[in-house]
Image: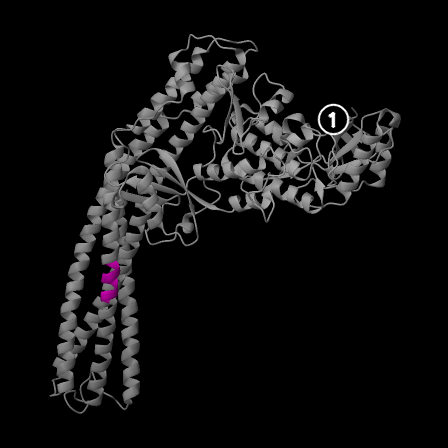
Amino acid sequence: METSSSSDWFQAKLLGNGSFGIVSLWKNKKTGDKLAIKTCKMNLLSNLTPRQIERWELEVSIMKNISHKNIVAFHDLSPALNQQLLKHNPTGLPIMSMEYCEKGNLRSQLNMIENSCGLFEQEVREILQDISQALKYLHIKRITHRDVKPENIVLQLYNHRKSATIYKLIDLGYAKEITGTASFVGTLQYLAPEIFHNDKYSHVVDYWSFGITTFEIICGFRPFDVPHMTPFKSFQNLRNKGPNDIYMYRKENNEICFSSEILRENFISQCLKQHLENWLRTVLEFNQKQRGNLYPNRDAFSGLQEILNKKIIVIFSMYTYEFYSYEIEDSTVLSTVQDWISRDIKMLKTEQFLISNDSESVQKDQFAVRYFSQDNDTMLYVFKKDVSVNKNFYHKLPIYVRTLIEDASKMYRSDDLKNLYKQALFYVSKEKKHMQTFERGMSSLNKMLLQTYSQIKGLLFHARQMVVKLLHRINFCRDFEKSLKDNGSFPNKRLEANLRDYEDLLNKAKECVRLYKTYFCRNFCINNNIRGLQSIFDNIERNFKDCDISSSYDEILFHIKTMEENQSKVNLKVVKALAGVIRMRDKLLRIPTINDFVRNVIKCLLKIEKFSTVLNCFIQDVANICNSMERNKVLRIRIVYENKNGAISTSSPSFSLNGCSQLDLKKILEENECWRYKFEEFINSNLQNYKEIRLQENYNF
């Protein structure tokens, strides 16, 4: 392989080697551009059959005439690179230049031991979304791919997704226009029955192969591959498949059986699993005339898109330590979701306490879609108000885990032992997800407590500002009243009524000041309560760290990767790692302080919620009294001005007009009051800041 050239382009590495084509990565030394170049590997054109030549030329023609974001794009070659590639292309067949997808192909992802039981739901959704759109585009162009499989799905960098990945279809070497003629092409394990049988076929062959691929990315293996059985033997057994069967397996007595369900060992939500099972039943229909008929007025890809567009809300029950998923509409309210939870968990709606993934309080009259998110595998947490975890919690171990632990001395066939290890790894992976979700649920509850209390502190500060404003109003009115008394009074019914109203307002204001003092003390008690809860939560978090099972997962993964080819004896380190996971899980769920913490936090949150309502009403009441006092003050000034020749002597220094008009005097008084307020607020603000700093030093949590 060349590593340099006279031009700016050089051949960097081999990407793939097919039956008669070879794909290499070429890089530009100056620009850093990369291209995947496919050339014929044969030395002479005469070494190729006419059909192979036709396939090659057809693939190049198709690639040049299609454009879709989920199909690898064709790129024109520069004259310099085209000239350089001639020596790598002795047959003279057209050179295919394509975009280079840096993240490899889907097969390499599935071959990772970590994915031996399938991919996570978000990855599954993205693959189904992208490849179904690519196939639908080809079918609209009247082109069948005929070789859909993980090897022909590549991953490209994509900044518009959280996963930073977009999936693209490649290798149209077997693609052809839909003509109905028969030819035996494709990869055996993904071939539709009609191709195997050499019958005429249509675009629905892509339904079958994409259905096989879909099952594989969910479960980690192909649905109709039975160990030690050839593809031809599998095809013979497939004739016995029922219309709803999507999975074939062999019992211990060698009997071949079928199932209409996806295996339980997967990483997708139960709700999505049920929808995809229905879809797989129609695309894996043995009879091509019936295949895809679940969607009579549209193609199977549109049906799949409808499934992927469904809003499925995922809830983790802290009480039962389990995930639940529900399909929701835009009009579904959380009260309805609570009914479903009550049905599945046997928990009354009045016992449920729901919080969001963002630590928001959840109200039953809100729309559930508000909490739906494609980016989060858990959208809501449900607690039981009086207890965290069911004290009678019992988790039944999967049979393969029990087998490894209880019968560690048993000898196995090497491939059977490896499958047991993979199932054990899946179990640990699921437990890891459950434990991490449980920890996040507890953290979200604690975060919600702190956020809610922070809002209370904000309301209390606002209430203090309103009370200070109210005191300013009272002080001004007192000074004004004193001035009236010092200058003598005059008989005026309007003024007397005004003063009576003022006395009523003054009594209400005094009550507000008294209430504020009680609210301040109430907040002080809540503060102390939260400080105690934070101390408990710190202890819980330390216990969480002690329950980490990452090392057990890594231990099992290591032994699978380093397993000898003919190993038949169980490695006791794997058994020890499994036992450690079970022990850590039980320790996590039995942390002594968890139940008290949850119960007291929920009680505290309910108290804070009521306190918040009280403070909001209090602030509104104080605002109303302030406004009433302001109106009372303005009316009193107007009465005094209108009766300036009565009780107020014009010779009095306090109210001497000195040639000023009535409007001038009013303006002077208002400006004086304004500056007085500003000065008093400045003094009070600094005094309050000093008090709050001292309070923080003593009671900060």
Q: Quadrant of the C terminus?
A: top left
**Left or right of residue 247, residue 150 in this image:** right
- Mark 1 is on which residue type? Gly
**Quadrant location, the N terminus:** top right
Left or right of 134? Residue 347 is left
| Element type where label 1 sits in the image | loop
Which segment is the magenta one? 615-622
Vertical arrangement, residue 328 with respect to residue 586, above or below: below
From the viewer's perspective, is 599 left or right of 407? left
Asked if residue 46 can be seen in this view, the reply is yes
Taking the magenta stretch, the answer to whether it contains residue 459 is no
> Can you give x and y, in whole percent of width and height, for residue 596 in the image?
23, 35
Instruction: Give the answer, above or below, for where 647 lies relative to 690.
Output: below
* Nearest to the observer: residue 480 or residue 218: 218
Q: Is residue 482 visible?
A: no
Report the number of numbered marks. Answer: 1
Q: Nearer the viewer, residue 88 or 274?
A: 274
Image location (x, y in percent) of residue 401: 41, 19
- According to the image, label 1 marks what residue? 18
Dominant SS in magenta: helix
Name the spot of residue 221 as percent of width and height, x first. 55, 26
Between 154 and 244, the one lying in front of the other is 244
State the residue at coordinates (84%, 27%): 49
| Residue 400 location (% of width, % of height) | 43, 19
Q: Residue at x 30, y 82 (%)?
A: 667
Residue at (16% x, 55% y) in the render = 518
Residue 458 lies, with reference to residue 682, above or below; the image says above
